[in-house]
């Protein structure tokens, strides 16, 4: 559990006064009656329920659909803070794409000894099938969600890079729309950078990486696993917002090395597939032969240059948690610059010395599965019981290469509506980045908030909620 005396409060300074970006919001909150935010939270819940904004939670029982908790108090980021974050994110995503191109071609970073070759070549996220192939514009990860945490006024860390199929952008957009309905007066007193253009920018990005971007009209589809996927709401939301077809694998087929979509008329050739299914399920002829979600022959059509898949197969190697520790080296190697944004110090449990340290300090640190996500399969030492630590120790000792560990950071906190009123709760931030003919970074992103006092777990699957994120314009 985080020490409430040491975390950085994003709204209040040490003297209890409002920091500059929050000054108007603090005054506005002071003027509101006690039950005002409770009523507005209920209104927001009704909106979300009516729109069907849900996510699936998987556990021992069958998956259940839940509303994602929404906090009506926005998180605010100043224009100067955002400029620094944007520069760091831009640097990072360009370096990661250069890294992916290199490891699937000349592997110069491995030859230079900057990353152990086995860490790449023996990694299950590395796809040998991508070797020698260059996607359009040399872009591998077209949509990236960069998870950031703040620990002080001027210190931000990148927690992880989501380069496979990052989710959450629909919640970012729905949070903004809901806030504009509930509190129009707040937007009159704040110059908030817009996020509603994201679907248009996403479509423009996808069009720019089509096999023939000069075509007057590109056929783009969003490939979903189907209605039982936890992010299906987002898949449908984005397809509708972009004006493209939402398809499942059975809606597509390959003929003469090209991908076609079945329609009520004649088949239509597909130029770009924004896929939201994992690599293993994309094509049963190349990857998992039991996959019912993908399209037989898709990968050969892709390698032939007749269709673009976004994000490219094999991009998981760039957000693998074992690779994460080397991202500062990756940035320096491909840009010649020091990283603008810091990594969290990381112990790789596949190394004997690191493993020994982690085993000796389990009660103080956070241990994560290399391929884990959503807050599953991890240990937060300071909040774990002795029994949980003992059980986790056995798992870690049995498969140390499956884990990395990091210090427990004192995440910053934002004002949040809770049962007792307004109180600080810990947050992180996922800005969304689009890479095609240029790098486009949506101002703000999805703020996730740990709703339990002292909790550091912000994942919605683990009881966290979301906030609207405001980037103030100059």
Image: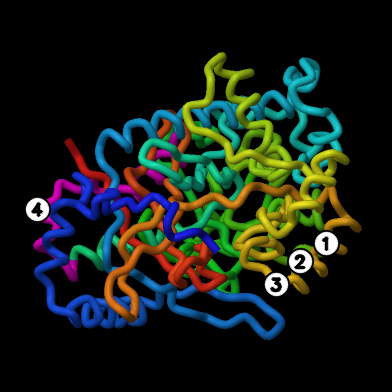
Q: Residue 385 bears which disc, if any?
A: 3
Q: Are marks 2 and 3 in contact (CB under 8 Å)?
A: yes
> Residue tagged by mark 2?
389
Q: Label 2 near label 1: C-beta < 8 Å?
A: yes
Q: Which residues are magenta?
A: 181-208
Q: CA distance from mark 1 to mark 2?
A: 6 Å
Q: Position of residue 261 (x, y in %)?
A: 56, 57
Depth check, mark 4 against mark 3: the one in front is 3
Say whether residue 326 is left or right of residue 187.
Answer: right
Q: Residue at x 22, y 76 (%)?
A: 37
Let me know if residue 193 is in the magenta part.
yes
State the separation of the CA atoms marked 1 and 4: 52 Å
Judge by depth and name the residue closer to the eye, 467 or 51.
467
| Residue 257 visible in the current orientation | no
Residue 333 on image: x %, y %: 63, 18
Is residue 247 visible in the rendered structure shown here? yes
Find residue 189 and name its label.
4
Taking the view exactly as shown, the residue that stands out farthest to the right is 398
- Residue sitting at x 27%, y 33%: 80
Asked which secondary structure carries label 4, the reply is helix
Q: Which residue is mark 1?
A: 393
> Splitting the image into 4 quarters, where does residue 136 fall?
top right
């Amino acid at each position: 559990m985080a020490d409430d005396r040491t975390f950085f409060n994003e709204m209040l300074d040490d003297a209890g006064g409002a920091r500059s970006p929050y000054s108007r919001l603090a005054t506005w909150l002071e003027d509101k009656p006690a039950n005002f935010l409770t009523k507005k939270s209920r209104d927001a819940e009704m909106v979300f329920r009516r729109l069907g904004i849900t996510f699936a939670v998987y556990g021992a029982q069958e998956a259940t659909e839940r509303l994602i908790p929404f906090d009506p108090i926005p998180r605010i980021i100043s224009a100067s803070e955002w400029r620094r974050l944007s520069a760091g994110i831009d640097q990072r995503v360009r370096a990661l794409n250069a890294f992916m191109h290199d490891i699937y071609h000349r592997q110069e970073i491995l030859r230079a000894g900057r990353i152990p070759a086995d860490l790449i070549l023996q990694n299950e996220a590395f796809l040998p099938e991508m070797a020698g192939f260059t996607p359009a514009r040399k872009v591998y990860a077209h949509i990236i969600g960069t998870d950031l945490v703040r620990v002080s006024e001027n210190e931000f860390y990148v927690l992880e890079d989501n380069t496979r199929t990052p989710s959450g952008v629909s919640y970012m957009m729905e949070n903004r729309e809901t806030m504009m309905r509930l509190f129009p007066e707040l937007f009159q007193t704040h110059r908030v950078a817009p996020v509603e253009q994201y679907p248009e920018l996403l479509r423009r990005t996808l069009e720019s990486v089509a096999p023939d971007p000069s075509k007057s009209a590109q056929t783009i589809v969003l490939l979903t696993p189907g209605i039982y996927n936890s992010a299906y709401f987002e898949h449908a939301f984005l397809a509708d917002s972009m004006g493209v077809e939402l398809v499942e694998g059975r809606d597509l087929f390959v003929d003469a090395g090209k991908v076609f979509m079945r329609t009520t008329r004649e088949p239509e050739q597909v130029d770009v597939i924004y896929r939201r299914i994992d690599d293993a399920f994309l094509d049963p002829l190349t990857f998992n032969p039991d996959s019912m979600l993908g399209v037989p022959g898709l990968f050969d059509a892709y390698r032939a240059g007749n269709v673009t898949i976004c994000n490219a197969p094999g991009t998981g190697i760039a957000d693998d948690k074992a690779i994460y520790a080397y991202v500062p080296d990756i940035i320096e190697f491909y840009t010649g610059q020091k990283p603008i944004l810091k990594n969290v110090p990381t112990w790789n449990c596949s190394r004997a010395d690191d493993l020994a340290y982690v085993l000796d300090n389990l009660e103080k640190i956070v241990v994560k599965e290399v391929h884990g996500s959503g807050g599953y399969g991890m240990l937060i030492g300071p909040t774990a019981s002795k029994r949980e630590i003992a059980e986790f120790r056995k798992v870690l000792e049995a498969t140390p290469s499956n884990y990395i560990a990091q210090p427990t950071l004192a995440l910053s906190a934002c004002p949040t509506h809770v049962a007792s009123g307004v109180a600080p709760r810990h947050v992180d931030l996922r800005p969304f980045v689009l890479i095609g003919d240029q790098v486009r970074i949506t101002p703000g992103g999805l703020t996730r908030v740990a709703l339990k006092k002292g909790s550091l777990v912000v994942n919605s699957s683990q009881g966290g909620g979301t906030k609207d994120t405001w980037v103030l314009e100059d």
